[in-house]
Amino acid sequence: MRLFLSIIFLFFLSPLKAATITELFGDGVFGTQWGDSISTVAQKLPKAHKESIGDITWLEVIDSKEVLGVSRKMQKIHFSFDAEKRLNGVAVYYDSEKHGVLLNKLITLFGEYSQVTGNKTALQWKNGVLVLTLVLSNDGFSANSIFSIGYYGLEKPDADKKSLGF
């Protein structure tokens, strides 16, 4: 009986395995899936509005949704798409003063990070086809802390030299 109780006691003391980046974000975020088309994401997020510069298109939502347990007040969430117009990234904006809290949260969840070469304010956590980035960005008028998730696991399109212009 003592042995049984000891085993049960140790079971409850055992630390739980933390979820990996892939387990948390591998199938998508905010009700979307990596590879979704712009129209599919727009249907899933009716408050999103379409933005573009030339051939680059993204969807933007402005809301106060708490993300990573950190509050936000009327900040942007960008949904980005590759050249084939498939969802491959999401960036969540915060006020710059949230940067320390976000960094602490990400270190707690995912451990050691690497610094992006050439950008002292950009930190990354990589896991397979997913890259999490935290960056402090200043656009000249205001500063933001931006947490982004990039997905690099989409099937690559067929290409040949001729179709690429070589």
Image (cartoon, rainbow, N blue to C red):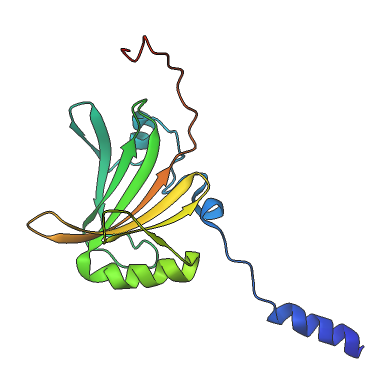
Residue 147 lies in what quarter of the image?
Answer: bottom left
> Is 110 located above or below residue 140 in the figure?
below
Which corner quadrant holds the C terminus?
A: top left
Q: Position of residue 81 (x, y in %)?
A: 34, 34
Q: Position of residue 124 (x, y in %)?
A: 39, 57
Name the residue at 33% across, 72% down. 101
Q: Which is nearer the eye, 82 or 50?
A: 82
Residue 162 lies in what quarter of the image?
Answer: top left
Q: Is residue 1 left or right of residue 56?
A: right
Name, please, the residue furthest toward the left: 141
> Is 103 located above or below residue 14 in the figure?
above
Name, please, the residue furthest toward the right: 1
Name the residue at 34% across, 15% down. 164
How many numbered discs, if any?
0
Q: Which is nearer the eye, 164 or 118?
A: 118
Residue 8 lies in what quarter of the image?
Answer: bottom right
Name the residue at 35% across, 32% down. 82
Name the residue at 33% across, 55% down. 116
Name, please, the residue furthest toward the top: 162
Q: Which is nearer the eye, 46 or 67?
A: 67
Which corner quadrant holds the N terminus?
A: bottom right
